Image: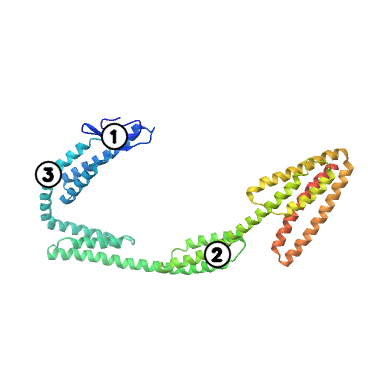
Amino acid sequence: MSDWGRVDADGNVYVKEGDGERLIGQWVTGGDAAEALAFYTRRFDNLETEVDLLEKRIEAGTVSPDDATKAVATIREQLVDAQAVGDLASLSARLDKVEPALGELRAKRKAEREQRTAEATEAKTRIVAEAEKIGAGQDWRNGADRLRALLDEWKALPRLSKSADDELWHRFSSARTAYTKKRKAHFGEQSVRRDEAKKIKEKLIEDAEALSGSTDWGATSGAYRDLMQRWKAAGSAPRNVEDKLWKRFRAAQDVFFQAREAANVAQESEFAENATVKREILVEAEALLPIKDLEATRRAWHDIADRWEAAGKVPRDQIKELEGRIRAVEKAIRDAGDQEWKRTDPEKSARADDMITKLEDAIAGIEADIAKAEAAGDAKKVKSLRENLESRQAFLEIAQRTASDFS
């Protein structure tokens, strides 16, 4: 609670007015009452600051009587049902005291208008000095606008005596002319650079369009990044063609990246189908456990493992789960084999050797098929065969490790 307001238990905020109080807002129930009062007190402070500023501007004569009258009306309107905590009545009283001062301000402004002719000499001298400074500089972006503004300011001032006015005008006009000549020369050089940038960017567009049909997603993505860096380094082409060049350059990239996205979507769809197949295979694999007939289980496992690898890749977010489940089955079969090995070492060794021979034969056959597919230019078949080869090689490594355990 403060001297000028309070917050009740329901979060309602009140300000004191006369002998009563007025509801001005509601704070979050259970919130900090002090924070609520501080918030509405700051609103009062803002109103008080506006009154302070208006009083000072009127006292200093830096505001017109009309503007001051409007400001008083605006603040009075803000005080009506103001959602603020503070001595609102005191602000109204201060505004009442301000209004008589406006008459004095009007009289002061009349006297100031009578002095403007004398002040015009000082103002025009200042304008000339600034124009000469701009004319000697190289602010091509803002200088021309500033000189136009100074010219408008000059025209708004009253004329001096003919000789004094002509002398100042000659200096002002000479500064503008010198600046304009240098600015034209600068933009002439810039035009040459922009034309060169146009040629560079047209060549970059040709390169981008030539790459747009590529399906080498990784390398081509890197090539487009390099083209983009070179595009930025080339600078700006003439304004009337820069946007058109950019649209062509961007369009070539869009063709490639949209194709890449479509390929990724298709691949994800393919991977999702692969995952469905692998889940069906998992049902068969997990049905092998617990192992009752190790040899029958192994035979079934070999077929399952082949079909598993042939099923291809799956979406990344399913790899851990699916691989974890199939490897659990594989481990169970391997562990069972280890136990059997302890009992029948020679037999196990022979079977491992037989498995190695079969895998080696199979690998040799796949490698031959890969060579044929590569010679035929069948990239899709090469990819499929290589995935199968990696699977067989992985099983060969397992079989070789198992055989080494028998030696």
**Left or right of 132 on screen, residue 390:** right
Residue under numbered circle 1: 14
Question: Which residue, as the protein is rendered here, is positioned at the far right?
Answer: 346
Give the amino acid type for the residue marked by disc 2 in the picture.
Answer: Val
Q: What residue is pinned by disc 2?
A: 255
Residue 124 appears left or right of 333 = left
The answer to whether residue 263 is visible is yes
Q: Amino acid at mark 1?
A: Tyr
At x 82%, y 48%, the residue is 299
Could you tell me residue 296's position as x and y percent? 84, 46
Q: Amino acid at mark 3?
A: Pro
As measured in the structure, the alpha-carbon distance from the residue carrying label 2 to the one carrying label 3 is 74 Å
Instruction: Determine which of the numbered discs, if any, sits on residue 371 in the image.
Output: none
Q: Quadrant of residue 374?
A: bottom right
Where, by quadrant of the figure, is residue 59 drawn?
A: top left
Neighbor class of circle 2 (other Cα within 10 Å; few <14, some 14-19, many 20+) is some
Judging by the rendered image, the residue that carries numbered circle 3 is 100
Residue at image location 28% in from the left, 60% down from the top: 146
The foreground one among 274 and 312 is 274
Closest to the observer, 405 or 173: 405
Report, in whole angstroms, how far the alpha carbon at label 3 lies from the one at label 1.
33 Å
Placement of the C terminus among the 4 image quadrants:
top right
Q: Is residue 62 visible?
A: no
Mark positioned earlier in the residue sequence (2 or 1) = 1
Which of the two discs, 2 and 3, labels the residue nearer the N terminus?
A: 3
